[in-house]
Amino acid sequence: MKKLNNYIGGDFINPFSDKYIENVNPSTGKIFSLIADSDENDVNLAVEAAKAAFPEWSCKGVEFRSKWLLKLANYIEENIEKFAQAETQDNGKPISLSRSMDIPRAVQNLSFFATAILHDKDEAYHTSTHVLNYTLRQPLGVVGCISPWNLPLYLFTWKIAPALASGNCVVAKPSELTPYTAYLLSEACQAIDFPAGVLNIVHGYGQKTGAAIVAHNDTKAISFTGGTQTGKTIASVAAPMFKKLSLELGGKNATVIFADADLEEATQTAVKAAFTNQGQICLCGSRILVENKIYEKFKTKFVEKVKQLQLGDPLDETTQQGATVSQAHQEKVLSYIELAKHEGGIILTGGNKVTSENLPERCKDGFFIEPTVIEGLSAFCRTNQEEIFGAVTTLIPFENENEAIEFANCTPYGLSASVWTQNLPKAHRVASQLETGIVWINTWLLRDLRTPFGGAKQSGVGREGGYEALRFFTEEKNVCLKF
Ligand code: NAD
């Protein structure tokens, strides 16, 4: 069986422990590869390799770094199908999504930051005729990047691209649930002769490998995307060490639909926002707030569209709903459906694990859940407060603008919201009062990589994207010159 080894200093290296973790394909329930079970010894080796590569990588200038990142982007683009197949196999997401979103976005992340650095500039302040100030933005050294399983290569590259582009060397860890495309990325580095030690990829469990990256004295910054609880643990270790920290955490996002919205478009997009990637995107609209006047009409249309979602083998081009990422996560999502029933929720569609008779033979042991819509719950109950991160959404009626804002803001999270109205002043008014890092108006998941990306409240600290990310991975130094 294929062993996914660590990529350190340009070589593939067995873990010190010589142990491996079984990697399960969630759509079949079968083990299909083995992942290095790394510990702090492997992390130490990776940090040493990164430290050794840093002087040259950081000094060579932006054109040099840009060229290498573009080579990496081109390699992925030329092998897009191989990466897409691996992503679907590892994560259970529909192949159409891997092909159209995950892998193209990984290419875009690398090329975006590779070219952004060519257009960046330093600031200078002409203080007086005898004094000039200028500000250098220097790379930090070795940085740690830790990513989750839901958008594996997409989020992995979203972190390593700005880190590398701004001159740092990286020790990165993908999720132990979805390591395959990060492994393919290390194969890509070897294939194109990417400078050794600049990017090191270490596989393993979060609490062992990830924790060792965070606790290492020589990782100067940690860029983390994952759950809020993990973010708290990481912050508790990194903050007393005065490391720079970027935390992109959980969400419980509202889709807010006013009575004057374009109902057809709002409904279509609300379905996508709730169920794309089986609801496993941090930006998914898992609470749909609907103005009372159109509640019943919206509900009928919405449920009808959800029932039409094509669930099946993720490798089938027509599949829209694939498998949940793991058995443990499937159980967690199902337990929330039980909780919702216990809290008085009414299941409008879905609500169950998909049974083997309703799945193709290859997938009969896979971890599938019916897309589920629930109504009848208070905005303040646990189902509507806690992140489920699966194919479950709730419908909540509201009376007026103030109540919509109150319900949208009433969770501990503050990542994103999607607001639907044709009344532009209202759209701006509501957007300004939502306690989230991102607001979409009459759309969802429309991204411009230059814009700041991140969450408020328990959804995170700091912003990624564009120059925000490049700045995170550098330290400003102001030089004041008197002449
Ligand atoms: P997770 O927190 O369990 O794991 C994320 C990563 O952190 C994994 O690589 C894991 O191995 C590692 N990790 C776990 N414990 C660690 C520790 N103590 N120290 C260092 N690393 C550790 O999250 P997950 O289940 O992989 O991902 C789902 C979560 O990610 C959801 O809450 C989702 O909302 C969130 N997410 C947020 C964003 C965003 O941009 N805000 C994007 C995607 C996912």
Image (cartoon, grey):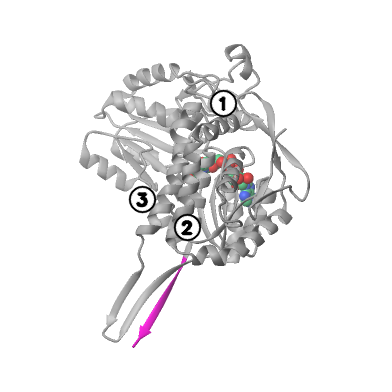
Mark 3 Cα-neighbour bin, 10 Å: few <14, some 14–19, many ≥20 = some
* Label of residue 157 in the image: none
Q: Nearer the viewer, residue 209 or 355?
A: 209
Residue under pointer 1: 323
SS assignment at label 2: helix
Q: Position of residue 292 (x, y in %)?
A: 31, 27
Q: Main secondary structure of the magenta part?
A: strand
Q: Is residue 463 above or below residue 301?
A: below
Task: Say which residue label 3 marks.
Answer: 450
Q: Nearer the viewer, mark 1 or mark 3?
A: 3
Figure quadrant, ligand 1: top right
Q: Is residue 254 left or right of residue 422?
A: right
The disc labelled 2 sits on which kind of residue? Arg
Badge 2 residue CB within 8 Å of ligand 1? no
Q: Residue at x 34, y 58 (%)?
A: 119
Disc on res. 65: 2
Asked if labels 2 and 3 touch by Cβ distance under 8 angstroms, the answer is no
Q: Secondary structure at mark 1?
A: loop
Q: Is residue 412 visible?
A: no
Amino acid tagged 3: Arg
Location of the N terminus (image quadrant): top right
User: What segment carries the magenta color?
Assistant: 475-483
Q: Position of residue 72 (x, y in %)?
A: 50, 47
